[in-house]
Amino acid sequence: MNELFIYNTEARKKERFIPIDPKNVRMYVCGVTVYGNAHIGNARPYTAFDILFRLLRHRYGEDHVTYARNITDIDDKIMQRATDEGVGIKAISRRYAKIFQADIAELGSLVPTLEPKATDHLPEMIKMMRTLIEKGHAYEAEGHVMFDVTSMSNYGRLSRHSRDELVAGARVDVAPYKRDAADFVLWKPSSKDQVGWGSPWGRGRPGWHLECSCMIEKHLGVEIDIHAGGQDLIFPHHENEIAQSECAHGHNFVRYWMHNGYLTVDGVKMSKSLGNFHTIREVLDQHGGEATRLSLLTAHYRQPVDFSHDNATEQKRRLDRWYRLTDGIEASDTVPETVIDALSDDLNTPMAIAALDALASPKTAADLKAGANFMGFLMQSNESWFRGEVPEGVSTEAIEAMIQARNQARLNKDFAESDRIRDSLLEQGIVLEDSADGTIWRRAD
Ligand SMILES: [Zn+2]
């Protein structure tokens, strides 16, 4: 097995992965803010980094990898939705967390080891803010607790943003009580009718960045191996996580930062006004979990991926072929090395999919199944996969039996009989495709 290389955003290059403790490899992926149905772009990190989780488990052992993916269950958008519906924030966050978890499970991603919720960590957040104030990295101002970016000499090192960009990124929080325009919020006050928690600085609620720093410290430790998320999180979110954790602990926070690229739909950015906004649920209902997962993985995770119905349909066809080839075949005990090697090169999923295609023949069907299963594919029985595919009144068993009979007729050089069987299947809506490796069938278009 080759070494594992991953592209580290902080170093801006591929690096060999060396875990802090191979007996407990720790990875964290920023989760979703649960205030509505997640869109298909949200699904990308949770499929790409699911592949990472699987690969780490393969390399270090299933019990030696801890994957935490948080749930942000306090946020102004959640509060707004709760107000609109006249319910508490828990009613909103529980509803959408459940939907999100069901969507991601249907996409074939493994359940993370831990799914901590922000609101379960208020004591940890208050403790971290106290530490940051004591060490001179944060200050209180008008019920807020602000992080003082001038107190950290290498603030901005992950995004490599200029001073102007850092200020522009923090501009959303323009406020007279800021000492520096780039300072960011750790804690903000809540009005009487807003959700809030008691703190030494008055009743309020945490800033988003603080949540992740505290959940990571509590569940994974002061320093972790891999922190991942969408590239839109590099600044300010991840930059600010680094600032909080490193200034509170006086210790390096993350060894490897990984970021996935954007998702477009039909070549353009998804937006509600363009009418190309798809929730994960809509896509799953139309294309199913495995075809959606495969279409998300056809691009390398750092590259943009374009989602289109044509691409999802194409991936469905590819899966149909893999399913037919592996029908009744038991997967090999070992995952093919070509698949592991491709993924070990910075999660090269297009190369891994090509490796699976290279195994797509009757002779290597057991390896195809092992490799596909490893990546979260061919997880259904053929019967359930092709349900709805086989025209009414035809069974897959009957089709297979007729293919067998046709093969026998061809062996006997009885081509009239072989053609009769083929035409009879075609009348029932089934097309046969012959190749050097054997015969497969598909539903006629
Ligand atoms: Zn985060």
Image: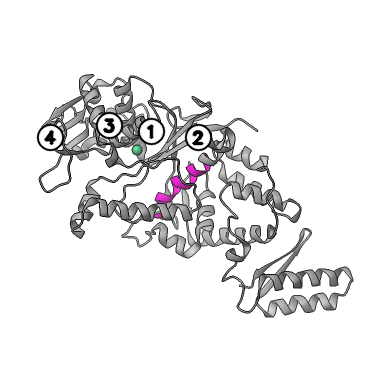
Q: Quadrant of the C terminus?
A: bottom right
Question: Mark number for residue 98?
Answer: none
What residue is rendered at 30% in x and 19% in y? 153
Give the residue at the far right of this rendering. 412
Residue 101 point in image, percent of width and height: 41, 52
Of mark 3 and mark 1, the one earlier in the sequence is 3
Report the amino acid beneath label 3: Glu
- The reply to whether discs 2 and 1 touch (Cβ–Cβ < 8 Å) is no
Report the amino acid beneath label 1: His
**Residue wearing tag 2:** 65
**Residue wearing tag 4:** 202
**Residue wearing tag 1:** 219
Report the amino acid beneath label 4: Gly
Is residue 299 a member of the stretch shown in magenta?
no
Is residue 1 shown to the viewer in this render? Answer: yes
- The reply to whether discs 4 and 1 touch (Cβ–Cβ < 8 Å) is no
Give left or right: position of 270 versus 411.
Answer: left
Residue 202 point in image, percent of width and height: 12, 34
Instruction: Tell me how far mark 3 sits from mark 4, CA to CA.
Output: 16 Å
Give residue 333's quadrant in the image: top right
Report the amino acid beneath label 2: Val
